[in-house]
Image (cartoon, rainbow, N blue to C red):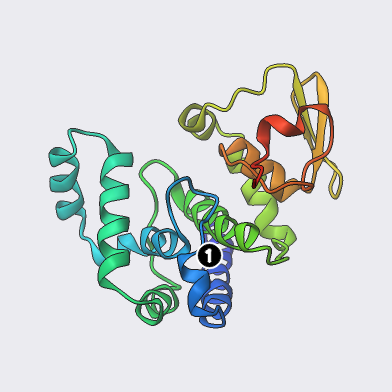
Amino acid sequence: MDTDIRQQIAAERRELADLLSELPPRSWDAPSLCAGWRVREVVAHMTMPYRHSGPSVLAGLVRARGNFDRLADRLARGDAAALGPRELTACLRDNAEHPWRPPGGGYAGALSHDVIHGMDITVALGIDRRVPGDRLRVLLGNALSPRSRRYFGVDLDGVELRADDVDWSLGTGTPLSGAAQDLVLVLCGRRLPERRLRGEPADRFTHFIR
């Protein structure tokens, strides 16, 4: 199982690196689905484990008073300022087979991390990239893990997530429909562009551009 997922991780990183290598320069400064981060900060964050050792991250975590989100933001912004698109893309591609795993998340967590942040970029830029089925199955399973649900803490009270492209649903209440990969983004606290979600609750999870 781990071997299969590691192959999926390597494929995901290489495919995303190919996509990033074709982006026009202005796209790197476009906002992503990660609040406050441009595309360049997202890629800097994705590649952070390949540049920063475990001890240096722990030291940074101490300086951030144990707040990992604060540390991740600081590192992403610093690395995005220091490294250009070509360097960030090369870092992702060169580490396609890197064995990094998020603490407590295993390889399924590593794959989910890469796929979700990849969608933070592609969905925000309006790029129609479909997550392959084998990766989507891992993604759906990981998004439902107690650890993931606790971390993101999305309020789904009274809402049923209902995928319209695979046989998958979650919760009870008023249906919120969309592609399974978009519903995973909802579970991860993202607000999606208009018209990607359908149903009465859609406005709660949509980012409206004025």
Q: Amino acid at mark 1?
A: Ile
Q: Which residue is mark 1?
A: 9
Picture residue at 63% right of the left edge, 50% below the top: 138
State which quadrant residue 104 falls in: top left
Percent x, y of residue 183:
70, 41
Percent x, y of residue 25:
48, 78
Task: Please say if 107 is above or below 161.
Answer: below
Q: Secondary structure at mark 1?
A: helix
Residue 59 appears left or right of 125: left
Camera-side residue of 159 and 39: 39
Q: Quadrant of the N terminus?
A: bottom right
Task: Please say if 25 is above or below 29.
Answer: below
Question: What is the crowding at mark 1: few (fewer than 14 residues within 10 Å), some, or many (at least 20)?
Answer: many
Percent x, y of residue 66:
22, 33
Percent x, y of residue 10:
52, 71
Which residue, as the protein is rendered here, is positioned at the far front? 210
State which quadrant residue 99 falls in: bottom left
Task: Please say if 116 is above or below 176.
Answer: below
Picture residue at 32% right of the left edge, 65% below the top: 80
Tally the marks: 1
Camera-side residue of 55 and 17: 17
